[in-house]
Amino acid sequence: MFTLENTIYLWTAIGIIIFPILLRITAPYGRHTTRNWGPMISNNLGWIIMEFPSLLLMPLLFFLSPGEKTWVSWIFPLLWIIHYANRTFIFPLRIRTKGKQMPLLIAIMAIGFNLMNGSINGLYLGNHAQNYTAEWLTDIRFMIGLLLFIGGMAINWQSDTILINLRKPGEKGYKIPYGGMFRWISCPNHFGEIIEWTGFAILTWSISGLAFAIWTAVNLIPRALDHHRWYRETFEDYPADRKAVIPFLW
Ligand code: NDP
């Protein structure tokens, strides 16, 4: 039957099935950009239009869905907005990619991805909002999830900042990043993002949060592996003991 729950299970299953395929495809944006994927658009504009649907949809659908809202449940759209306000407006204004482009197709696929994740989280959490009473704040799942969310976000922001600052204004090339969690892995921004959404899944204890955490890993682990391979091929002096995305493991 076509229900929100079944849609979320199906979406999660698609993510798991697609993972081994994505491990074999290099997503063509950033350093891996090619012109073989059709028309191109400005990289900075691409980021804004890709991420905006998520920023808008999750809080809107949460608000509009019929479940009775407790004040605790409003923490979920608030955390979402903090993340997506950065990703939609602040991040694209900070990155030093002036003149660079990305395939329009990547932006369209990312819009689809964000429409789906924003909608299922807004609808599911909005419809179940009445379950999150004041006791939820002292529930171990909320406390651990929130710690992971904040810690993951801090790692993500710190790592993105280190990467952005590698270029002086006007520069377009790549350098070896050092500092923060780059000591252990090539892509701590991706690692931080995976931890962040795992935390969101735990703090909401929801299938919609879990679906998004799985999809984030499905997207970002292959990307981090591609970046890691690229670093090792590009820089002879690349630190040999650095892993790709999970410290000491992978
Ligand atoms: P990257 O690490 O590829 O790039 C981040 C920025 O830093 C880009 O502007 C890039 O420039 C620049 N940069 C990266 N490495 C270097 C380097 N060695 N030297 C100089 N500049 C560098 O990140 P992504 O583009 O993959 O992702 C950006 C953010 O979006 C991340 O925080 C990621 O976690 C998040 N994201 C989340 C997804 C999800 O599913 N939730 C999906 C995709 C991204 P350039 O563009 O020129 O390479």
Image: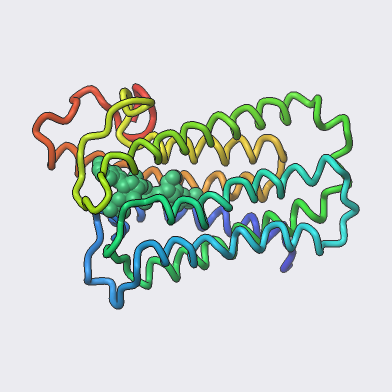
Give the residue furthest to the left.
236
State the colouring used for the structure image: rainbow
Left or right: 25 with respect to 232?
A: right
> Splitting the image into 4 quarters, where does residue 10 fall?
bottom right
Q: Nearer the viewer, residue 155 or 114?
A: 155
Task: Identify the residue at image location x=20%, y=39%.
Answer: 175
Give the residue furthest to the front.
169
Q: Residue 145, percent across and down?
A: 65, 31
Q: Residue 46, percent across and down?
A: 41, 66
> Splitting the image into 4 quarters, where does residue 71 fall?
top right
Left or right: 88 with respect to 29?
A: right
Left or right: 84 with respect to 63?
A: left
168 relative to 54, above or below: above
> Splitting the image into 4 quarters, where does residue 73 fall?
top right
Whether residue 249 is visible: yes
Is the C terminus in the top left, top right, bottom left or bottom right quadrant?
Answer: top left
Task: Identify the residue at image location x=19%, y=26%.
Answer: 239
Q: How many marks?
A: 0
Task: Identify the residue at image location x=40%, y=39%.
Answer: 161
Task: Identify the residue at image location x=41%, y=50%.
Answer: 94
Is the N terminus in the top left, top right, bottom left or bottom right quadrant?
Answer: bottom right
Q: Residue 7, percent across and down?
A: 66, 62
Q: Residue 101, percent across and down?
A: 29, 66
203 relative to 184, above or below: below
Left or right: 239 with respect to 58?
A: left
Whether residue 219 is visible: no
Q: Nearer the viewer, residue 224 or 182?
A: 182
